[in-house]
Image (cartoon, rainbow, N blue to C red):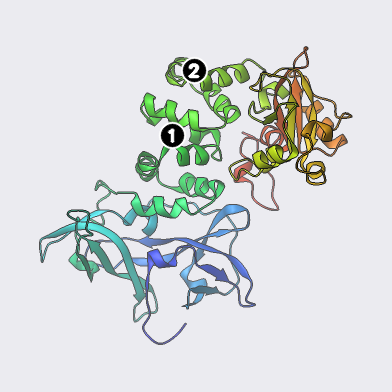
Amino acid sequence: MSTAPVRVYAARLVGLPIFDPQGDQVGKVRDLVVAVRSEVNQPRVLGMVAEVFGRRRIFVPMTRVTNIDSGQVYTTGLLNMRRFEQRPTETLVIGQMLERQVTIPGSGVRGTVYDVGMEQARNRDWVLSRVAVQEPGRFRRRGQTHVVEWSEVEGLTRRDETQGATLLIAQLSDMKPADAAQVLHDLPRERRAAVVADMDDERLADVLEELPEEDQVEILNHLDAERAADVLEEMSPDDAADLIADLAPETAATLLELMESEDAEDVKRLMSYAEETAGGMMTPEPVILGPQATVADALAHIRNPDLPVSLAAMVYVCRQPLETPTGRLLGCAHVQRLLREPPSSLAAAAIDTSLDALRPEATIDEVAAHLATYNLVACPVVDEAGRLLGAVTVDDLLDHMLPENWRDHEPGGTVTHG
C-alpha cells in the first residue's frame, strides 16, 4: 500500500468497484467489518463486505487489499468466494454504526453518526480513527457537524442505542429491488426492523417481492396490520397471494379484510387455485385492450417503465369488460409484430391466432412445456368460456420451479433443498 498516511471514510467507500491485479472488476464494496474492543481503543478493520457476481456477499480481508485510491479498491485477486456470515464479535460499520445516537462528553454534544473514518496504524493495520457526528437540525436546517477522535465519542459500542435508517434507505433507493432485498436480508434483525419502519410502502413492496419467503413473513408479521395491508396492496397480486398463503390463517384473514376490496378480490381469486398451477402462478394484470384499440394504443401501454419486461412482450385483445376475468379473449399480439404495423391500424389485426391459451388447472410442467414449445415469455390463461383470467410469464414459472432457497445458491455448487 501507499506509504503516505491515508484516511478513508466508510460512507464514501460503499459502492466503489473492487479490482484484481489485472484490472478486472470483481465486485463492489458494501460494508466494513470491524472488531470493536472498547470506546477507548480504536477498532481494527478486519475487512470489507463485497458484493460479487450473483449479488452474493463475500468477505475480503484487509490483508488482501493492496490499495484504496481515486475511488477504487485494489486487491491481490485471491478472494474466498464463500458467502459472508457475520460473527458475534464483529460489527458492520454501515449496517450497525452509522446513524447511531452518540455523545461527545468533552463538549456535551449529542448527535447522530453520519460517517466513520479509517486509517492505517503504525503496525499497518487499518483502524477506525475518526467519527463524524451531526447535531439535530432546527427549522429544517442541517445541524452542526463535528469530526472527532474515536476515543472522544460515547455510545458507539452500546448495542441498545437507537439507530436511524435515513442514510441506508437513501442507498437502497438507488439499487434495483433485488439488490436492495439482498442488503436487507443481510442486515441484523434489529437494524432491518428500523429500515423497514422508515421505508415507504411502494418501495418496501418492491423489495419484499425479491426476498425469501421466511424474510417476507417475518417482516410482514412485525408490521401493524393496517400498514401490512397497505404494503400488500402495492405488491403484484400473484406475489401478494403467495405471501398471504404463508401467513397464519387468522393473520391472512385480517389482512385481506383490511385491503381495498378490489385488491383483495384479485388476491382471493389467485388463492383459489392450487399453487403449482397456471392459475396459481398467473398475474391478473396483463396489458388488456378492447377490439377498437389501435397499435399506437398498445405501444403506449407497453412503454410503461413500471411494467415487467415479460408482461410488456404481449398485449391481450378482449371483449368487454377489460378487467380480469374479461370478456372473451380474441387473441394476443406480440410486441415485435406491433412494431411492424402502422400505428393507426387496429391492434386486433396483429393478433397471433395460432397461439393456444392455458387453462388455470394446467400443471407447472404443462406450463413449462407450453412456453418452451412455442418460445414464449408469456401466455394467456382462460376459463371454460374463453374469458381471460390472467397471464403466466416466464419469471412466474421460474419463481415456482426454482427451490425455495435458490437465492442462497453458491455458484458452481449445489442448492440444498430445505
Q: Residues within 10 Å of mark 1 (few under 14, many from 20)?
A: some
- Would you say residue 92 is visible in this rendering? no
Nearer the observer, 232 or 96: 232
Residue 144 against residue 237 in the figure, above or below: below
Coordinates of residue 59 in the picture (x, y in percent): 51, 60
Answer whether labels 1 and 2 touch (C-beta < 8 Å). no
Q: Residues within 10 Å of mark 2 (few under 14, many from 20)?
A: few
Q: Residue at x 42, y 19 (%)?
A: 258
In this picture, residue 361 sits left or right of residue 14:
right
Residue underneath mark 1: 219
Pick out the residue farthest to the top: 385
Between disc 1 and disc 2, whose residue precedes? Answer: 1
- The quarter of the displayed image where residue 388 is located: top right
Residue 35 against residue 287 in the figure, above or below: below
Coordinates of residue 383 in the picture (x, y in percent): 75, 15
Coordinates of residue 153 in the picture (x, y in percent): 20, 63
Nearer the observer, 98 or 322: 322
Q: Amino acid at mark 1?
A: Ile
Task: Measure the alpha-carbon separation of dots 1 and 2.
Answer: 23 Å
Residue 327 against residue 21 in the figure, above or below: above
Residue underneath mark 2: 261
Q: Amino acid at mark 2?
A: Ser
Q: Element under label 2?
A: helix
- Would you say residue 312 is visible in this rendering? yes
